[in-house]
Image (cartoon, helix red, strand yellow):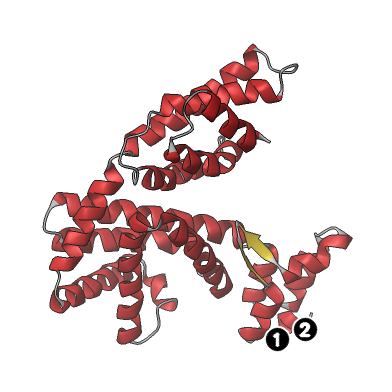
Amino acid sequence: TFPEMFRFNAIVMGLGQRPWMGEVLAAFEAIVSNVANAPRLQQECDVLAIKVSKFPVPPDLSEFKAVMLTSLRALVPKAWGSEHEVAWVWLWDNVARILAAQLGKPARFHKALVDMFQAFDEKRLAKLRRGIFATFFASAPVGENHFNQSTTRLHFIIGKILSLTESIYKKPGEVVTLLGALGLRHVGYGVPSETFAPFVSAAVEAARRSAPNQEAADAFRWSLDLIARILMRVVSEGSTIVMRAINANSAKLLRKAVAYAPRRERSQWVLSVAVGSESISPLMWAIEQGSLEAADA
């Protein structure tokens, strides 16, 4: 396989002691699969930049390129030609350019964000929470339909969001997995992805007014924007026609949705919706949320 060949060639080329290469290799399949999807490629590179920035020695991205090309040539020696060489060089040069623009930021941003939150007392945090929701509801009134909880609950939600903006710098892999599960719950609740952008704008504006310096404000904006982009992708990929029918609690729409599926896949369409490593069962969700008309269909 490519990962096995890559590890072998890295050792042969004297680059086996480059732990950051393991992080790039783990993300490589997702990067290659989404090379034509610029927003997703940027997202993958942003998460990868956080992981790679944790190593004390800055990575030399040209080293990965050399091992990558050597491994690919070895795997398909007869088929490999100049067009393959140009294509893979182009891919990695684009990835390296995106990564190079972000490397160094995560470590600085993490420190700035931790310092800001540690300096906040409960009074300042409460003011920040109120400012976020006041600005959000003013710019996107539809958001009130999805945040119709008590003030205590709203403050709890904001507290979790603020915690995620700091945690993604510390444990990016865990947070991305958590966001996958959270995004699928948003699909179940029928939260439109159009509400994410105004919420991020409101939160960034409130944080800008409270931040002690521009670095802290930039750190908050960068991590919250990344979190929102991950959630929006999960919501977009998970909002299947079956889930939309269940959210509408319509047996007619559900039967129509399932009719589009190949016969041997119809049961799977109503039993599982998967995005990445996370999944949700439309049938179980319909039962749990009381969409009994759709569940009975």
Q: Position of residue 193 (x, y in %)?
A: 48, 61
Which of the 4 image quadrants contains residue 147?
Answer: bottom left
Q: CA distance from mark 2 to mark 1?
A: 6 Å
Is the C terminus in the top left, top right, bottom left or bottom right quadrant?
A: bottom right
**Residue named by callout 2:** 296
Which of the 4 image quadrants contains residue 185?
Answer: bottom right
* Label annotation for residue 292: 1
Q: Nearer the viewer, residue 279 or 257?
A: 279
- The residue positioned 51% from the left and 44% from the top of the image is 40
- The residue positioned 61% from the left and 25% from the top of the image is 71
- The residue positioned 35% from the left and 72% from the top of the image is 160
Which of the 4 image quadrants contains residue 72?
Answer: top right
Question: In the image, what residue type sits under mark 2?
Answer: Asp
Question: In the image, what residue type sits under mark 1?
Answer: Leu
Indicate whether 102 appears above or below 91. below
Q: Position of residue 207 (x, y in %)?
A: 21, 62
Q: Secondary structure at mark 1?
A: helix
